[in-house]
Amino acid sequence: MRKDQTKVKAVLQAGTPGQQLTVMGWVRSKRGNKAVAFIALNDGSTIANLQVVVDVTLFSEELLRQITTGACIRVDGNVVESPGQQQRVELQAARIELLGTADPQAYPLQKKGHSLEFLREIAYLRPRTNTFGAILRLRHAMSYAIHEFFHSKGFYYLHTPLITSSDAEGAGAMFRVTTLPPQNPPTTEDGRVNWAEDFFGKMTSLTVSGQLEGELGALALGEIYTFGPTFRAENSNTPRHLAEFWMIEPEMAFYDIHDNMDLAEEMLKYLTRYALEHCEDDLKFLNDNWDKELLERLHFVLEHEFVRLGYTEAIGILEQANRKWEFPVKWGVDLQSEHERYLVEEHFHKPVILTDYPAEIKAFYMKQNEDGKTVRAMDVLFPKIGEIIGGSERESDYTKLKSKIDALGIPEKDVWWYLDTRRFGTAPHSGFGLGFERLMLFITGMGNIRDVIPFPRTPGHCEF
Ligand code: 4AD
Ligand code: MG
C-alpha cells in the first residue's frame, strides 16, 4: 500500500469523522440525483464497500459521467459519520482522480448477480465480484493458517520438486515435461522418442504428489510438510477434480496411523476455527448467498469427534443400506463419492476416517497389515465433499516394501533412493495429503471446485 493510501477495510473499521484520507479502488455502483452522487467503492481489502459521497456541483460532468461500474478511481476526502443504516462512516469526496475508465457497453460485470457458469468464462474479472473476493480472501487465510499450524507444532516446510523423473506414486496420469521439438523429436533405432536427448537426459513429468521426497525430509528433519501445486492428467470432469491443484502433505517420523489420524483431525479443526474467527464477513456473505447451512456445518465439524472406522465395517454398513448404488458395493471395491457421502451425511452424520483398506486399491508404500489383505491407509471423508484427505502409515520394512515393489513391477531404477531410506536408519512414519481446493470447498460451501481456485485447469480448459 502506498504511504498516502488508506485501505477501505481500515476506513470502515477505524475511520473517525474529521479524518482526511485517500482511498483507491474500483467502482461497484453509482447512484444519486442532481445534487449528490453515491459511489460504492471496493478495493479488495474487505467484502464491504466504502460509500463515497459526491457533491456533484464540485466536479465536472465529464468526470462524473466516466465514473461507471468497474472504473478505477482515487478519492481524497473527509471521513464523516454516515446518516445511512448500512455503514458507520462514509467519505465526503474533496478530489477525485479517474485512474482507469471501464466502458459500460463493454464491461462484463454488472451490479446484478451473474451465474457461476458465466463467471467461469470471465475468470480474469471474477475476483472483482463479492463472491470471488470472499473466496480468494478465504484462500489466503487458509494458506496462512496452514503454515501457522505446522510452524507452531515444530514442522518444517519442505520444498519438494515439481518436475520429477519418477512415476512411482501411481496417483494418476502425468503431464510430460519436454523441450524436444513436437514435429521431429530425436528417435532411437527402434523409432521411439529418444528421451536421453531431452532436457534432463530422461523422460520427465510434472509431479502428482510431493510425498516420496517428503518422506526423505521426515526421515531427517522429523516432522515436515509440503504445500505446493500438483498435476494430474486424468480425464475427470467432476465438481471435485482439477488437473492442477494444491496439496498439503505432512510427513512425520515416529507417527503410527493413530497419531496420523489425530494430526489430520486437529489440523482440519484448527483451519475451520481459524476461518470462523478471522473471516466472519466473508463467511457470512457466502452463507447468506450460496449455502445457508455453511456456518452451521463449520460449527458442527468443530464440535464433533470424527468417527474412526475400518473399511471392512464400512462395507458392511453400505451393504445393509438398502439402496441402489450406481457403483455396486462389495469387499474389495474402491469407494465412490456416493458411498463416502452416505457414510458421512446419512449414516453417521459426522466426518469419518476410514482405515485399513484392501491393499489392491491403495498405493505400494502403505504399511501392510498382519492379515495380508489390508494396509494402514486412512481417508478422511467430509460432508458434501467425500474424500478430503488421503494418507497412511508407511511401510518401513525394507523386505516387505521391496517385495511389494517387485510384485507391482515398479522398476527399481525409479525407486532405489526411496528403498534406501528403509536400508539406512528406517523408522516408523506416516503422512497424508490434504487437497487444498477440497478444503476450500468445505470452508466456502461452494459446490464446484472450479470456483475455489483463481484460474481452474480442467480437461479442455486452460484459460488465462
Ligand atoms: O489421495 P491422494 O491421491 O493421495 C496422495 O497423493 C498421497 N501422496 C498423499 C499423501 O499421503 N502424502 O490425494 C490426496 C488428496 C485427496 O484426498 C484429495 O483431497 C486431493 O488430494 N485430490 C484432488 N483434489 C483436486 N483435484 C484432483 N484431481 C485431486 N486428486 C486428489
Ligand atoms: Mg486418495
Image (tube, helix red, strand yellow):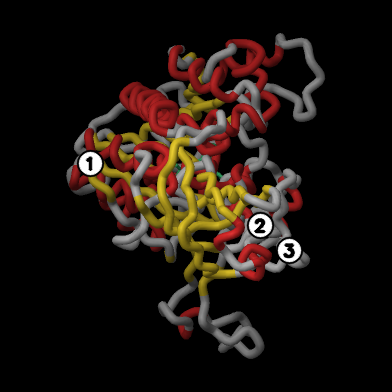
Residue type (three-letter) at the residue carrying disc 1? Thr
Q: Nearer the viewer, residue 337 or 29?
A: 29
Q: Is residue 294 above or below residue 321?
A: below
Earlier-in-chain disc, 1 versus 3: 3
Q: Estimate the x, y position of residue 450 in percent, counting from the top left.
A: 64, 48
- The answer to whether residue 301 is visible is yes
Q: In percent of the image, x 73 and y 63: which residue is there? A: 104
- Quarter of the view holding residue 4: bottom left
Q: In percent of the image, x 60 and y 48: which residue is there? A: 38
Pointer 3 with pointer 2, Cβ within 8 A: yes
Residue topped by disc 3 = 104
Residue topped by disc 1 = 426
Residue topped by disc 2 = 69
Q: Is residue 310 above or below residue 163?
A: above
* Crowd tier of the residue under label 1, counting other residues whose Cα lies within 10 Å: few below 14, some 14–19, many 20 or above: some
What is the spatial separation of the Cα atoms under label 2 and label 1, in whole angstroms? Answer: 62 Å
Numbered disc 1: secondary structure = loop
- The answer to whether residue 333 is visible is no
Left or right of 198 on screen, residue 402 = left
What is the spatial separation of the Cα atoms under label 3 and label 2, in whole angstroms? Answer: 7 Å
Residue type (three-letter) at the residue carrying disc 2? Thr
Earlier-in-chain disc, 3 versus 2: 2
* Crowd tier of the residue under label 3, counting other residues whose Cα lies within 10 Å: few below 14, some 14–19, many 20 or above: some
Numbered disc 2: secondary structure = loop
